[in-house]
Image (tube, grey):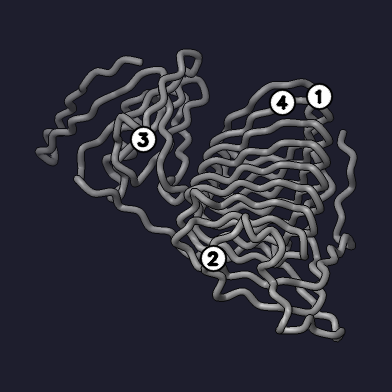
């Protein structure tokens, strides 16, 4: 990776813009809320167009220009070397704009589509005895401070609707675009998705996918498939038995976990998790609030300083009435 500085003078408004450009690199912000917007640059535009876009955007501190796709990403976070990743095969540049010494990050409350709404029904059955110790299961996996753990009746949780129309992925590859997409990733394939507004993905068994730097992500992950979602604003994922999910630098997330599914969480905001027996969640490196509904036998790891917000359910039943069509064209 190499960089150079550029100085642009605007005589009309008597302004000098000083930027530093890192070639063959991408920007990895600390917060998923740092992405302001994607800008499509005109066909006759250039990296200077991206520089102007960030200049005229009050909260923009860093921008990334993709030469071939003519896409400019605007970020509120400061351009620091620790956030810049050198990638020799990427035809993109990170542009550092020195506007402020402090990052300007806001995480607006976003209303998600009704398809993401979770319906929870508490069955009128016998509540577990409050004298039963809900922390006795996997006691080595949770801290000694267990205030906030409740005991509840069985839960019925309606899974979100993931849709029926898919783009079929038949070969291992990657895609990066300013628009959204719906991807059905076939068994055993590896597929990477980045820089999209909205992504819905279906992973067949043993598939492996990374969805990076997108705003909204929904994913259905079959058995033994692996999904990683760094730098996503809002994530909703269903994990089948023995499926795995890694959440990092996300704004908010909701995860539904079958038995033996695995989840790791780091540097995320608000996360809501439903864990069936023998599912496991590791949030030891997470700073945000995790709300967990779990069956006996589910394993949970929290930071030593946190106070778990947990509900032990005698059972959790997933309602599959909204199940998607599992085929693609």
Identify the image quadrant of residue 137.
bottom right
Which mark, residue 190? Answer: 4
* Residue 299 placement (x, y as % from top left): 69, 55
Cα distance between the residues tagged 3 and 1: 33 Å
Q: Look at mark 3 in the image and give the residue it sits on.
A: 63
Q: Is 135 situated above or below 46?
A: below
Marks 4 and 2, how far apart in space? Answer: 40 Å
Assign a secondary structure to mark 1: loop
Q: Which residue in the protein does label 2 denote?
A: 144
Seen in the picture, residue 329 relative to 149 is either above or below; the reply is above
Up/down of 278 relative to 4, above or below = below
Number of numbered discs present? 4
Residue 147 screen position, x and y as percent: 55, 75
Question: What residue appears at the point 47 percent right and 49 percent down from the top-left corner?
Answer: 267
Residue underneath mark 1: 170
Q: Earlier in the sequence, mark 2 or mark 3?
A: 3
């Amino acid at each position: 990776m190499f960089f150079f500085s550029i100085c642009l003078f605007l005589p009309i408004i008597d302004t000098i813009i000083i930027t530093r450009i890192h070639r063959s690199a991408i920007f990895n912000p600390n917060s998923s809320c740092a992405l302001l917007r994607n800008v499509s640059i005109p066909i006759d535009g250039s990296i200077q167009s991206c520089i102007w876009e960030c200049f005229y955007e009050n909260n923009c501190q860093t921008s990334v220009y993709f030469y071939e796709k003519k896409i400019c990403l605007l970020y509120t976070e400061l351009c620091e070397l620790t956030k810049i990743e050198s990638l020799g095969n990427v035809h993109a540049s990170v542009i550092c704009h020195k506007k402020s010494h402090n990052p300007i990050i806001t995480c607006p409350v976003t209303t998600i589509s009704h398809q993401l709404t979770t319906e929870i029904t508490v069955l009128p059955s016998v509540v577990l005895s409050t004298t039963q110790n809900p922390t006795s299961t996997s006691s080595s996996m949770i801290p000694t401070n267990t205030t906030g753990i409740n005991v509840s009746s069985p839960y019925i949780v309606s899974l979100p609707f993931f849709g029926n129309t898919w783009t079929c992925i038949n070969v291992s590859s990657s895609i990066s675009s300013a628009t959204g997409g719906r991807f059905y990733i076939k068994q055993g394939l590896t597929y990477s998705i980045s820089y999209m507004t909205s992504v819905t993905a279906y992973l067949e068994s043993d598939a492996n996918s990374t969805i990076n730097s997108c705003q909204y992500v929904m994913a259905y992950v079959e058995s033994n498939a692996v999904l990683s979602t760094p730098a996503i604003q809002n994530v909703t994922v269903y994990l089948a038995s023995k499926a795995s999910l890694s959440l990092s630098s996300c704004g908010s997330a909701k995860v539904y976990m079958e038995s033996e599914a695995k989840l790791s969480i780091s540097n995320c905001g608000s996360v809501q998790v439903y864990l069936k027996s023998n599912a496991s969640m590791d949030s030891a490196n997470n700073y945000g609030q995790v709300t967990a509904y779990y069956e006996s036998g589910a394993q949970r790891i929290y930071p030593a300083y946190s106070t778990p917000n947990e509900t032990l359910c005698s059972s959790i039943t997933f309602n599959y009435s909204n199940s998607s069509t599992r085929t693609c064209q």
